Amino acid sequence: MQHVNTACIVVNDSPRCQKGNKSSPYNVAYQGTEMSTVTIYAGLPSDTTNKMVTPGCQLDALVPASYGDVYFGADGCLYDSSSTQINGQCCRNPPTTPIQVVNPYYKG
């Protein structure tokens, strides 16, 4: 599961935020392999007027399928339930191609 410690992110096109609106965990479907892949977009503008926004970073993460809980930290990195960073995976790079994602802050 993907939990968000601060702000909002988009996980495989599904908005997720810290406590409050859209805060339920995201369940990464079992992919039949030891590692599951997930695309995370973060660094989202907190604009409430646009349905789609340009993320500041993209993380194509590999997460052990056996992990029950994965956390997206305030520093943009992935952590397991023991607060150990997962393989140094952090959302630092801009998207590989220009992209717009669903705005979790949108108030329409």
Image (cartoon, rainbow, N blue to C red):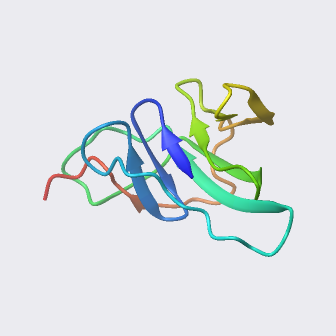
User: 58 above or below 30?
Assistant: above
User: Number of numbered discs present?
Assistant: 0
User: 46 above or below 10?
Assistant: above
Q: Residue 86, image x and y in percent? A: 77, 36
Which residue is outermost to the bottom?
32
**Horizontal side of residue 85 vs 13, given as left or right:** right
Which residue is outermost to the left?
108
Closer-to-camera residue (7/24): 24
- Quadrant into which the C terminus falls: bottom left
| Residue drawn at x 50%, y 43% as measured from the top left | 3
| Residue drawn at x 64%, y 58% as measured from the top left | 39
Q: Residue 32, image x and y in percent? A: 80, 75
Q: Residue 101, image x and y in percent? A: 44, 60
**Horizontal side of residue 65 vs 16, given as left or right:** right
**Horizontal side of residue 77 vs 74, given as left or right:** right
Q: Quadrant of residue 46?
A: top left
| Residue drawn at x 27%, y 60% as measured from the top left | 51
Q: Residue 104, image x and y in percent? A: 32, 51
**Horizontal side of residue 43 vs 24, given as left or right:** right
| Residue drawn at x 31%, y 51% as measured from the top left | 22
